[in-house]
Structure formats: structure tokens, C-alpha cells
Amino acid sequence: MQPLSYEVILWDWNGTLLSDSEFCSTIINGMLRRRGLAERSLEEHARLFDFPVIVYYERVGFDLDKEPFEVTSQEFIDAYYSGVEKCPLKQACDVVLNSLKAAGYRQLILSASHQDHLEKQVTHYGLMEYFEELLGIDTVHAPGKTGRGHEWIVESGIEPARVLLIGDTVHDSEVAEKMGIDCWLVLGGHHPLERLTETGRRIFNDITEVQAELLDSVQMETGT
């Protein structure tokens, strides 16, 4: 086995480092219930979840011909940001991030979250010290998750082969492919194993397995 060539880790936030998938499904079920629509199990939410999220809303049962997507989605956003900071981080999240930083990996977050919200959440959980930069979306300059990541790669001058995106959805794999970088996927987020398997990417049970793989590579490279 050869050492891995990664220098930069781009972490997805929602579902990868922050355990918010159950919270999201609870909000959606409440919205469905208030409209007299059938609620979905956590497993169904994971199977139906997709990007763009309008597709997900249609799949779970919202009638977007009767109610504009913008109205429905704003209801979700308001509920999400009013309670998201009660969601737990993934198990051993701070330990994983600290050990990878100590091993020399450069770490950033790449997220479709609004920049202000992303900064607020990462600060709330006390994780800012582990990240070189937070790459979220803002209202003035919003090229999307793929564009935001690509911009950073161009500006930093890093070789794409040295960058690894770690996420929890098929969309993360698609983003990585468009950026020309590698991607690993972890379970326990917004997509189940059967959806992640479709990508052909490496799949890990949790971020501690990712940590072990990356640290093993450093030890092989340094001979320690």
C-alpha cells in the first residue's frame, strides 16, 4: 500500500461533521403533518433526500403546484436555524479534527450553507481553530458549492490531486467530480449505504475510520 497524496481535506458540514439528519427529517415531518400529508420514516427521508432540494420536497409529498417552493423552503430554513445548534457533532469530531491538524493536514469546510450561518455554527461548537478557512455561500457572491470549492483551489494554487472531499451524500461525490478531486463518503448522514454505493467511492462507517486511514498514510510516508 502506497501513502496517500492528500494535503488538503475539504469537510462537508451538514451530515458529515454535524449530526443534523434526524433534526431535518423531524422538521419536514412537522411541515407535512400541518398540511395533512403523510409523514416519512427516517429511512425514507434518507432514501428520498436529493439535490436540488426541490426534488426532495416533491418526493416526500409536498404539492409545489399549490404552494410555491420558496414558501415551503423558507419555513424549513426558519425552523432549522432556530434549533440546529442543539444538534450534536459526530462522535469524536473534535478528536478527529485535532489529530489530523496535528498530523499536518490542512482542513477546510466546504458547505452549501450561508457563510454567516456556517461561521456561527462552527464557532458555536468551538471548532474554528481546526480550519484554515470556511467556504460557505454568501448572497453577494454565490457560485454554489462546486464553484466555491473550485475558486479556492484556483486561488490557492493547490493541485487537485492533493485535495480530498469528505461528505455524506451522492451530491458530495458529484461536487468532487466536477472539481476534479477525490471524495470519500461516510455513513450516518443524509444518504444511506445503498445511495452512497451508487457513486463507486470509498465508504466509511464514521469519521474515526477516515481519521485512521489518513493517519496511517502519514505514518507510512514518514516511516514512524
Image: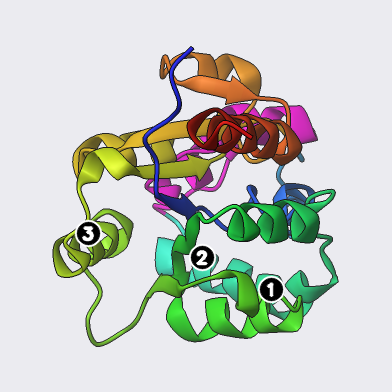
Give the SS element for disc 1.
loop
Quadrant where the image shows the C terminus: top right
> Which residue does the numbered mark 2 point to in the structure image?
73
In this view of the protein, which residue sits in the foreground, 63 or 80? 80
Is 68 left, or right, of 20 in this rendering?
left
Is 88 left, or right, of 188 in this rendering?
right
In this view of the protein, which residue sits in the foreground, 159 or 110? 159
> Which residue does the numbered mark 1 point to in the structure image?
127
- The region drawn magenta spans 40-65
As drawn, 108 above or below 59: below
Badge 1 density bin: few <14, some 14–19, many ≥20, Cα 10 Å: some
Question: Mark 3 belongs to which amino acid?
Answer: Ile
Q: How far is disc 2 from disc 1 in space, using C-alphas? A: 28 Å
Q: Is residue 1 magenta?
A: no
- For image coordinates 63% across by 40% down, the residue present is 190
Query: Residue 83 location in percent, x, y?
Result: 78, 75
Query: Residue 195 location in percent, x, y?
Result: 53, 20
Sequence-wise, the earlier of marks 2 and 3 is 2
Question: Mark 1 belongs to which amino acid?
Answer: Leu
Check if mark 2's residue and mark 1's residue have beta carbons within 8 Å: no
Give the SS element for disc 2.
helix
Q: How far is disc 2 from disc 3 in space, using C-alphas? A: 31 Å
> Which residue does the numbered mark 3 point to in the structure image?
153
Q: Is residue 41 magenta?
A: yes
